[in-house]
C-alpha cells in the first residue's frame, strides 16, 4: 500500500479533537482564520465544537466582523413559499413558510420551515435579518441561524391595515422597525395615523425591547412598505393628486423623528402610474414602469434637501409581457449590472453598458411567494 494511502487512512481514524490539534499545529492561525471566515454560519456553528481554539476564534468579535464583511460581498438569495390555513372553528389563520437559501451558483445552502399563528407578509430587506408583518404582530428571523422571534406587542391598528418598514442603520449598528397604524375610531375621521419605533441590536434580547411612540403624527395614508435610505424611511403617498406638482413621497427622519414630504421629478410624475420606491447603492430610487410604453425609468434622488431627481436609467421592456412589466422589481446593483426580480418567477441581470437582459436559468423556478437578497451573519436575537 502506498504511503500516501496509509497517511490518509491514519488521519481519517483520528478523533475530531486530535484532527483539529493536528490542523492547528500544521497550519498558521492566519490561514485557518482566512478559511473559516469564508464558511457559512450553519457550518461554523458545528465547527465550534471541534476544538477550544476554533471555538475561541469563531466567537471572537474580529472574526465575526470579518465574516460579516465577506458575506456582504457575496449575498445569497432567500426564497420563501407560504401556505395559509384558516381554522373554521377558531377563525384563526395559520401560516406555514418554507425557506430556502440559494447561492448565485445554484447550490442550495440550507432550508427550513416556519409556522406562525398569523396571516403574514414579508417586509423588503437585503440584510441578514428578515421581518414578517402580521395581523397580530411582527416577527423577525435570522435565516443563517434559523432563530425566529415574535417581537413585543405593537399598537393596535383599528383598520387592521398594517404599514411598516425595517432597515439596518450602520452608523448606530442597529435595526429599526417603524410601524404606522390607524388609531381613528370613528368613520368620519379621515386620517389619524400614529407612528412608533422599535430598535434592537445584535446580542440583545429582542423580547425586552420596547416600542417608542413618536410625537409627530403621520400626515398621509401611504402605500407600499417603507424603504430605508440615509437614516430615513420613505413611502409613496396614497392620496390622489390634482396635478403632478404636489408632493408624492413621505419621509420620516429617524434622528429628528419628524415627517416631511418629498417632491417627485418635476413635470413628469403621473400619480395614476405604477410608481414604487427601492434602494440601490444606498440611494433612493423612484421606479416608473407604466408612464412610457415598454419602458422602465429609474429616477435617483441626488439632492435630498432640494429634492433634485435625475433619470439615471431607462430599460426597454419589450421582451416581457404587458402584465408582467408591472411586477419587475430592481433588487440591487453591482459590477455594472442591476439584478431584477421578475414576479418571483425568474431573476434577470440588466447590463448597464450594453443595455441587455440576461436570465439566470432555473435558479428560482418553483412559484415562490417572496424573494429576497440576504447576507450570512451570526446576529443574535437573544432567544437562545
Image: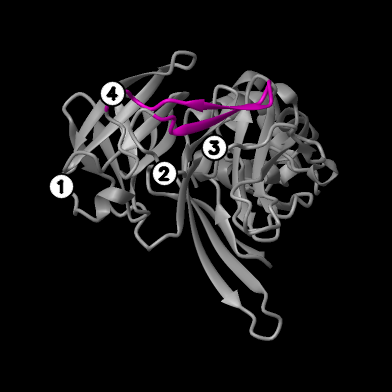
Q: Is residue 48 visible?
A: yes
268 above or below 241?
A: above
Give 238 or 124, whichever is nearer the viewer. 238
Give 80 or 250, whichever is nearer the viewer. 250
- Residue 21 sits in which quadrant? top right
Horizontal arrangement in the rendering, residue 41 relative to residue 308 (left or right): right
Task: First in sequence, mark 3 or 2: give its number.
Answer: 2
| Residue receiving disc 2 | 240
For discs 2 and 1, the disc positioned in front in the rendered view: 2
Q: Is residue 112 visible?
A: no
Q: Are marks 3 and 2 in contact (CB under 8 Å)?
A: no
Q: Residue furthest front?
A: 188
- Residue 247 sits in which quadrant? top left
Q: Which mark is residue 319?
A: 1
Horizontal arrangement in the rendering, residue 276 relative to residue 109 (left or right): left
Task: First in sequence, mark 3 or 4: give its number.
Answer: 4
| Residue receiving disc 4 | 311
Disc 3 from disc 2: Cα separation? 38 Å
Q: Are marks 1 and 4 in contact (CB under 8 Å)?
A: no
Q: Residues within 10 Å of mark 4 (few under 14, many from 20)?
A: some
307 above or below 18?
A: above
Q: Are marks 2 and 1 in contact (CB under 8 Å)?
A: no
Q: Which mark is residue 375?
A: 3
Disc 3 from disc 4: Cα separation? 29 Å
What residue is rendered at 61% in x and 65% in y?
119
Disc 3 from disc 1: Cα separation? 31 Å
Give x and y (percent) for residue 266.
32, 23
Give x and y (percent) for residue 78.
49, 49
Q: Are marks 3 and 1 in contact (CB under 8 Å)?
A: no
For mark 3, give the secondary structure.
Answer: loop
Q: Residues within 10 Å of mark 1 (few under 14, many from 20)?
A: few
Task: First in sequence, mark 2 or 4: give its number.
Answer: 2
Amino acid at each position: 500500500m502506498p504511503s500516501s494511502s496509509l497517511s490518509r487512512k491514519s488521519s481519517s481514524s483520528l478523533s475530531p479533537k486530535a484532527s483539529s490539534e493536528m490542523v492547528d499545529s500544521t497550519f498558521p492561525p492566519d490561514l485557518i482564520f482566512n478559511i473559516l471566515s469564508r464558511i457559512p454560519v450553519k457550518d461554523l456553528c458545528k465547527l465550534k465544537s471541534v476544538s477550544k481554539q476554533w471555538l475561541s476564534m469563531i466567537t471572537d468579535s474580529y472574526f465575526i466582523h470579518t465574516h460579516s464583511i465577506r458575506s456582504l460581498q457575496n449575498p445569497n438569495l432567500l426564497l420563501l413559499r407560504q401556505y395559509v390555513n384558516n381554522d373554521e372553528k377558531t377563525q384563526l389563520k395559520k401560516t406555514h413558510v418554507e425557506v430556502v437559501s440559494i447561492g448565485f451558483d445554484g447550490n442550495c445552502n440550507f432550508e427550513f420551515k416556519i409556522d406562525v399563528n398569523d396571516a403574514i407578509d414579508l417586509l423588503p430587506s437585503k440584510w441578514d435579518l428578515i421581518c414578517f408583518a402580521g395581523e397580530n404582530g411582527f416577527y423577525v428571523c435570522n435565516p443563517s441561524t434559523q432563530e425566529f422571534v415574535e417581537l413585543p406587542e405593537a399598537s393596535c391598528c383599528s383598520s387592521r391595515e398594517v404599514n411598516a418598514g425595517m432597515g439596518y442603520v450602520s452608523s448606530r449598528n442597529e435595526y429599526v422597525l417603524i410601524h404606522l397604524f390607524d388609531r381613528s375610531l370613528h368613520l368620519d375621521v379621515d386620517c389619524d395615523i400614529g407612528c412608533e419605533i422599535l430598535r434592537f441590536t445584535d446580542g440583545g434580547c429582542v423580547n425586552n425591547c420596547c416600542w417608542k411612540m413618536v410625537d409627530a403624527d403621520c400626515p398621509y395614508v401611504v402605500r407600499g412598505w417603507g424603504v430605508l435610505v440615509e437614516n430615513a424611511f420613505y413611502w409613496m403617498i396614497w392620496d390622489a393628486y390634482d396635478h403632478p406638482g404636489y408632493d408624492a413621497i413621505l419621509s420620516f427622519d429617524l434622528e429628528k423623528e419628524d415627517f416631511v414630504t418629498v417632491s417627485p421629478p418635476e413635470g413628469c410624475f403621473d400619480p395614476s402610474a405604477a410608481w414604487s420606491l427601492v434602494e440601490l447603492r444606498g440611494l433612493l430610487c423612484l421606479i416608473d414602469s407604466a408612464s412610457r410604453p415598454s419602458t422602465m425609468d429609474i429616477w435617483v434622488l441626488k439632492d435630498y434637501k432640494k429634492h433634485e431627481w435625475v433619470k439615471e436609467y431607462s430599460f426597454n421592456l419589450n421582451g416581457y409581457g404587458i402584465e408582467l412589466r408591472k411586477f419587475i422589481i430592481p433588487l440591487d446593483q453591482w459590477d455594472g449590472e442591476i439584478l431584477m426580480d421578475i414576479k418571483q418567477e425568474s431573476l434577470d441581470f440588466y447590463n448597464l453598458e450594453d443595455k441587455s437582459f440576461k436570465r439566470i436559468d432555473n435558479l428560482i423556478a418553483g412559484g415562490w411567494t417572496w424573494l429576497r437578497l440576504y447576507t450570512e451573519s451570526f446576529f443574535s436575537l437573544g432567544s437562545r
